[in-house]
Image (cartoon, rainbow, N blue to C red):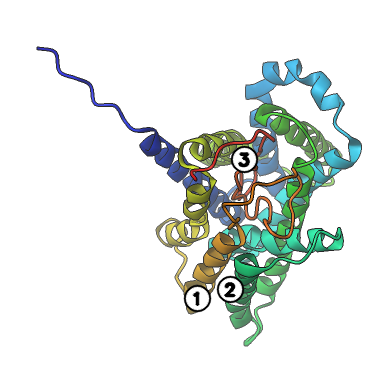
Amino acid sequence: MVGTRRRVSPATVGMLALLLTVAIWAAFALSARALSSSTLQPADAGLLRFGVPLVVLAPALWRRRRQLAAVRPAAAAKIIGGAGVPFFLAAMYGGGLTSAAFVGSLIPGMVPLFVSALMVRAGRGVPKGTQAAGLALIAVGVLALVSPSTVPLDRDVLVGSGVLLLASGLWALYTVGLREVSLDPVGSIGLLCLPSFAVLALLVVTGVLPTNLGHAAGGDILLFLVVQGLGVGLCAGLLYAFAIRRLGAQRASVVGSLSPVAASLLAIPLLDESLTLAVLVGVPLITAGVVLANVRPRAIAPTTDMPDASGISNASGIPHASDIPDASGIPGVRPRTKVPTDA
C-alpha cells in the first residue's frame, strides 16, 4: 500500500516566502548598522549590492537591453536616484550614526508620508479615513523615536535620523518612478543596478569615495554579498511578488509591516543593541501606521497605475493589489503586473 504524499498548501508556501522576505528586509537594516564596525567602506558594500545582481542576471539583462534603452529618462532618473547610490549611501551613513531600529523604522515608515506629499503636490487629493489616521500614527511614532535624542542633545542620532529621513524621501521618489515604467522584475533590477554600479565604480576609481575591498575581511565580504547582493538585490522582490500571489496584498502588507519590529528584536542579540523606551513606543506606532496607510477599500478597484492619496502606493515597500515591491523596503523591484487580492 502506497502512502499518499501530503501536499503543502499554497498559503503555507506563500507565508514562508513572506517571512523570508521580512527577514531580508530586517537584515538590510542590520547590515546598515553593522557596516560601521566592519572592514568594508560604504562604497564597497554598494559595489556588492549592485554588482552581484548584474553578474547573476547578465544573460537575462542582455535580452532586455531594448526595453531598458526605451525607458524614459525622467522615470529612469527617479529610479536610479531614488534607490541607487544616493539612497544606499544615505541609508548606510544614517545607520552608522543611529541603530538598526532607526533604519528599519524611519526609512520604510516615512515613505507613506513622502509619497502622500508628492501626490498632494500633483493635485491628486489629500488622504482620508484610515490612511490619514495611518499617516498621523507614523508621524507620532517618528517623534517618539527621535525626540529623546533632543534632551540631552545627541548630535549623532539627530544627524543620522535626518539622513535616514532623506533616504526615505529618495525611496518615495523611487516608488513613483517605478510606476512609470513597464519593465518586469529582472528588467527593473537591471535599470537600477547597472548605472548605480557604474557610478560607484567611477567614484571609487577616481578616489572620490574610499575603498577597502581589497583588504577587507573575508567574512565581511561574504556577509554583505549574501545580505545586500543576493538577499536585497535579488531575492526580496521575487519572494515578495510570489507571496502576494499566494496570500493577497492585504495579508501580505500586514505581515510585511513587521520588518521594523524584526529588525529591532534581531539587533539585540546580533548587534548588542537595547530596547529603549523610545524604540518600544515608536516602532509599534510606525508599524501600525504603515499598515493603516496601506489599507485600500476592497470594493474600489484601482483605475490607474499611479499612486494616489486614497491608496498610497508602495508605502514602505508594502504593496497594494497593483504593486509588487521588493525592499526595505527597503530596496528591490516590482513589475506593473496586476495580481489578484485575497478578496
Q: Mark 2 points at which residue?
A: 141
Q: Are the residues flagged by discs 1 and 2 in contact, CB closer than 8 Å? A: yes
Which quadrant of the figure contains the N terminus? top left
| Side of 184 where 80 appears, left or right | right
- Nearer-the-camera pick, 42 or 23: 23
Depth check, front residue: 34 or 211: 34
In the rendered structure, which disc, 1 or 2, sits on the residue that comes first in sequence?
2
At 69% across and 29% down in the image, what residue appears?
A: 184
What's the amino acid at mark 1? Val
Distance of label 1 from label 2 (alpha carbons): 7 Å
Q: What residue type is labelled 3?
A: Ile
Camera sees residue 294? yes
Q: Is residue 237 above or below residue 118?
A: above
Residue 324 badge: 3
Q: Residue at x 44, y 63 (%)?
A: 272
Q: Mark 1 points at which residue?
A: 281
| Residue sitting at x 68%, y 51% | 313
Q: Earlier in the sequence, mark 3 or mark 2?
A: 2
> Does the residue at mark 3 contact the one at mark 2 (Cβ under 8 Å)?
no
Whether residue 2 sits left or right of residue 221 in the image: it is: left
- Name the outermost residue toward the front: 299
* Mark whose residue sits in front, 3 or 2: 3
Q: Dot 1, how many residues are within 10 Å of its Cα: few (below 14), some (14-19), or many (20+)? A: some
Image height check: is 169 above or below 48?
Answer: below
Element class at badge 2: helix
Q: Where is residue 291 shown, x and y percent of the image? A: 55, 60
N-terminal of the two: label 1 or label 3?
A: 1
Q: Which amino acid does label 2 sit on?
A: Gly
Is disc 1 placed on a helix, strand or loop? helix
Q: Which label lies toward us, 1 or 3?
A: 3
